[in-house]
Each structure stands twice: as structure tokens, then as C-alpha cells.
Amino acid sequence: MTDRPNILLIVADQLVAELTGAYGHPVVRTPNLDRLAARGVRFDAAYCPVPVCSPSRSSMLSGRHASTNSAWDNAAPIASDIPMLPHYLSTVGYDSALSGKMHFVGADQVHGFGARLTTDMFPSTLAWTPDRDAVGRFVHPGNPDGPPIAIDYVTAGPVQWTEQLQFDEETHYRAMEYLRSRRTSRRGSLQVPTAEPERSPFFLVASYHHPHEPFLAPQRYWDMYEDAPIDPVRVPASDDLPRSPMDEWVDTLHGVDGVDLTDPEEVHRTRRAYYALVTYIDDKLGELLDVLEETGHGEDTVVIFTSDHGDMLGERGMVQKRTFYEWSARIPLIVAGGPVAAKGTASSTPVSLVDLVPTVCEMVGAEAVRPDGRSVLSELAGEPASPAPVFVEYHSEGVYAPCWMRRDGDLKYTYVHGHGEQLFDLATDPDELHDLVNDPRFAEAVTTAREDVLARFDPDGIERRIRDSLADRAVVRSGMSATGTVWAYDPDPALFTRYWRET
């Protein structure tokens, strides 16, 4: 019997860390996140690798920056020869499965998972490849056929059902079914629990769509917040706020000029629905934790809860993600179980989702190949941290130049290639209201941060690679459309051999 822990990775989509009870919010109900944090480590300065879905997820599973993977946007294929976490884990005897949303783009829709339990939610093809005009500006969002993104922020409310809820319910069912199957065997017509010590440890990813927009919440979750004090926008849009060219570009992409993000009633409805959807996801977490206990895997499973990025939710007059401000780039990250000894603690050390691969690999005795992240196993063990600067990047789908964020300690630096810089001290300015980039007291810090970004990354080379990728993808997209080629993944449930049929 192996002493390696099982790994359960739970991924929400577009979840703002501070809008959870586990991170101190007084209204949003997340009793199961609270429960997980009480027996694990809560990272208070965790960041996504890229503030957009597909590139962030591929970086999380590979342990490499998006620019290393050429994962530029939500329609950039990920090469099959990039090792992913399930590849590493399979080399040391793990069984791996993926349930739900991962937004792999390209012909490889498995990337090392032994089983994929559901189909995905968004296109696996190049359909969402963004277009640029002659001077490099994006002329439409990644999804050219949809309405302006900002519309979803003024159409929130309760519903009986949506396709997004249907997807999450299927994701959840398949994940629960997988966990239960780890401790069941067939005896006559009954499923009888049985310990099976010879089984391999498992790695299961349960990845949900919510609380990503549209903000349409099941009625019972909406009703939970009927009389709750819903937060207004904390940092309204203002001419006095620091703004970078990146902010202007992203606002244009999201279509924020077409909606009124200042209407208090609309803000109230949007955030009420968002709170409701956060609690919906928290309930899913609770059921997964319960089934771990029921199957006897409560103690030998490491549970990791996180999100691919956050959501501005009207802060600074902005919506969705694609920016480096805290509401967009900072994410929840809670790790509990197995060898996690620092129970009920919080770490203020900046970390990134690219740290997940080296951490898990060190935990189970696998070797990660050229990871861009670092292991945070020492923090999980309650030992002194060895902090290093954390990087977030965003180069495509709405912006006209490569962009980086670097956090080192409390200082958060942003660099938009050819278009300026920003610097914020999050210790004294958590809402990022005061740009210190021209403050002589921080001149050395700015120089150090800029030199570090330029030493690690090649902005001009990245820009060339993006332009080449967009041109190549435009041709392939057109050809695939003409031939009807698809890359969609349809899981084979082996319908004729499941249960007692045709066996």
C-alpha cells in the first residue's frame, strides 16, 4: 500500500478571494471553505498565472508561464508534448481523472489524464481566436458572436435553471461518482463498501463554471441573501484613479461603455447573485468533502481549492478579468489534508498557481521538468517560507502589447511594454489607489522590478510570436470551418459494459 496521498483539486471559475467567508467576508456564506481552511493553509497572496481562463488553467497544470506554453488567449492550443501534472503523477502510480471545465484548445483534449469524465464547456477549436487590425488592435472579443461582456453585469437575478448550472451539476455528479467508486465493489445487486489497499492513489480534478457570469443563481441560493447587506462598489470609477493603457484596452474589449455600472440597484442585484453562486460552489465543495469522509479518504487525501482568476465586479468601473488589479488577479488558494501540518494557518507569502506542480510533485516524489514555479511544501509544513517574486502576465485578447505584473513582498509592479509602468504598495494601499512609480523613494524598487521582468521575459519576441500565432490560427480556423473538422471531446462511458449490461 502506497503512502502517497490522494489529490483532489477543486477549481472554481472567476472567484474573488475576498468574497468568501474563508477570507474574512462577513456576509458571503462559505462554511465548507471555512471548514477546509480550519484544517489547512490559506494563502492570502495567491495569484493566477494569467487573468483569463484557458491560459491560466494550462499554466496551473504545467507549472509553466503562459508565455512558456505559448498559451496566449482562450483559443491558443497547448502542445501535447508539454508535461502536465497528471503526466507527472502517472509516473509514480497515480490514477487520474478530470471532471468538468478545463478549456483545453487543440486536438489533445486529455493532456495526461487517465480519464475525462465529462465533455468541456467552451470551444476546443480555434473559433475564439481574436482578430487584430493592421496596427495590432483587437477588433472583437474572443467570442465574436456574443453580446458585449459587460451586459451580463446588469442582467443578474434568480433562475430555475441554466445550461451553466446543468454543466456544473454533471461535473459534480461525475466527480462524486468517481470518488465513490474508489471504495465500492459489486456483490450481487448491492454496492458494498470494501477497503481496497492495492488500489493506486488518485488525482481527481473537479472543475466548475460558477461563479463565472452570467450571474443567474438558483432561486434558493438567491433567497439566502434576501435581507443581507450587499457590498456596494468599494472603488468607483474616477478620473483620479491610476489607469494604465491596459485598463483602457480591456474596458473597450468588455464593452463597459455600453452599460451603466454605477446604478446601485444593478450593482446590488449583480453582487447578490454572485454571493449566491459562491455559496452554490461552496455547497459542492462540502459534498465532495463529505464523500471523502464516507469513503474513508478524509485523512489520506490532499484537498486543494482554488480558482483560475477573479472578477472586477464593477470595481474601478471594470468587469470580468484581464487586468492585474487584486479583484481580477488574486485568487483563493487553500490546501488541506495529507502531509499539510500547518493546520488552520494563513500564509502571506506571495504564491502562484504555477507553484502547484512543483509542490505536488515534491509531495509525492515525482520530478517536475523545468517548472517556472517553486514548491511551497515548506509553507504547508509550517516551516519558514523561501519567498520569490510572483509573476502574472497577459499579452493577447484585448491588449495591444505584452503586459506583466510582478509582486515581491508588498510591492506590486506592472509593466505594459512600450506603454508605461505602475507600482503599488499593498501594505498601505490595498485598493491600489496611489501609483508610486514616479515616487523617488521607490526608484530603486521600480528599476529592480523592471530589470527582473525584462531579464526573465522577451517582450518583443513574445509580440512576434503572438502575431505569428494569430496569422497561423486564422488559416487553420478557416480550413477547419470549411472541412467541418472538430476537436471536441466526447467521453466514452462504455455504455454497453457499465453496471451489469453486456458483461
Image: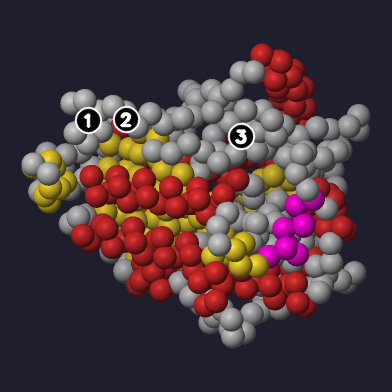
* Mark earlier in primary sequence (2, 3): 3
Q: Give the spatial CA distance, label 2 vs label 1.
A: 8 Å
Q: How is the image coloured?
A: secondary structure
- Marks 2 & 1, CB-CB < 8 Å contact: yes
Give residue 161's position: percent from left, percent from top: 55, 57
Quarter of the image containing the C terminus?
top left
- Residue holding disc 1: 501
**Dot 2 crowding, Cα within 10 Å, few <14, some 14–19, many 20+:** few
Q: Which stretch did the figure color magenta? A: 148-156
- Residue holding disc 3: 123
- Marks 1 & 3, CB-CB < 8 Å contact: no
Rendered image quadrant of residue 199? top left
Q: Which mark is residue 495?
A: 2
Q: Can I make out residue 317 in this image?
A: yes
User: What is the three-letter code of the residue carrying label 1?
Assistant: Arg
Of helix, strand and loop, which mostly describes the magenta segment?
A: helix
Q: Which of 206 and 493 is in front in this view?
A: 493
Q: Give the spatial CA distance, label 1 vs label 3.
A: 33 Å
**Dot 1 crowding, Cα within 10 Å, few <14, some 14–19, many 20+:** few
User: What is the three-letter code of the residue carrying label 3?
Assistant: Pro
Give residue 53's position: percent from left, percent from top: 60, 45
Residue depth check, mark 2 versus mark 3: number of the one nearer the observer? 2
Q: Give the spatial CA distance, label 2 vs label 3.
A: 25 Å
Residue depth check, mark 1 versus mark 3: number of the one nearer the observer? 1
Q: In this view, does 189 lie above or below 338?
A: above
